Image (tube, rainbow, N blue to C red):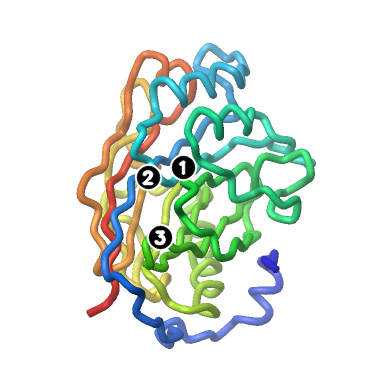
Amino acid sequence: MPRTISYENLKGRLVGWNLTKRHTFQSPLCSVLHLACLSWNVHRARGNDGIVDPKRTVDTLLTEVWRSKVQILCLQEADGEKPPYSGILDRGRIEAGTGLVSVHQQSNLRSHDDALGFLGMVVFVHPHVEVQDVRLVDMAGLYPRGAVIVDAGSDGFSFRLVATHLSLSQPLRVMQMRTIAQHLARFDARPTVLCGDLNEWRPWGGLAFSKAILGATFAGSRCATFPVSRPMLALDRFLVSAPGVIHHAEAVDSPAIRMTSDHRPLYAEITLKTEA
């Protein structure tokens, strides 16, 4: 069964873990996988007019943001800000409109029975993506922060998705990414996509995404997504583990998107590869 692992448990059990000693990874049937992905901080359905309108958020997602080739959709701030973190958006409409399926079907994979996902983060995947395991990582922060880690397979290729929403504070971002890296070091190494509202404004990525913290080399998109009306900061990102590459990344824009959230959605076309 999937396990929820708290920050305190990780901190107590994994201090001193050598992140360079990764478990061996068995080569899959194919050595390359192409993915089309979307990530969007929906701002708890609060538009730039100050109105909280979940229906408008889902309407914009389905009519302005969605692309038919997308296999993975990651949303941030899709649940309430305070306990019990009740869901804000209509999961049924999202699944029906996109053809994707939430990985949070089981109640133990959500913050609460009424939540859409885990601490506002929700992951949807295409039905042809085989979800092998879902793990939740609770992290330290001034506000509730966490990560949804999905081990999956597609066309014989095993990969990992880490969807997260990091702190505005750089020291906390470093701590949070170190927590994620320590968690990943306990499992098999596999090609990995790291995505979400990473709140890193530095174009070069900052310490939090360095090999010293993550234990592996990650690189990716630097498209400005915030603020939505005139983006200047690349707060939302897709990063992939080497030797994977991001061929195309784009901050999606439209008048409806500018009214719906304070972030622009980020679309990426990714190729994951196994180590030679």
| Residue with the mark numbered 2 | 37
Q: Quadrant location of residue 148?
A: bottom right
Q: Quadrant of the N terminus?
A: bottom right
**Amino acid type of the residue tagged 1 in the rendering:** Leu
Contact, CB < 8 Å: mark 1 with mark 2?
A: yes
Q: Which residue is mark 3?
A: 154
Residue 250 lies left or right of residue 152; in this view the side is: left
Quadrant containing the C terminus in the rendered view: bottom left
Mark 3–mark 1 distance (CA, rounded to whole Å) = 15 Å
Q: Residue at x 45, y 36 (%)?
A: 40
At mark 2, the secondary structure is strand
Q: Position of residue 112 (x, y in %)?
A: 77, 46
- Mark 1 — residue? 73
Give the Cα distance between marks 1 and 2. Answer: 6 Å
- Please tell me whether residue 137 is drawn above or below residue 200 in the rendered image: below
Give residue 157's quadrant in the image: bottom left
| Sequence-wise first label, 3 or 1 | 1
Secondary structure type for disc 1: strand
Crowd tier of the residue under label 3, counting other residues whose Cα lies within 10 Å: few below 14, some 14–19, many 20 or above: some
- In front here: 253 or 24? 24
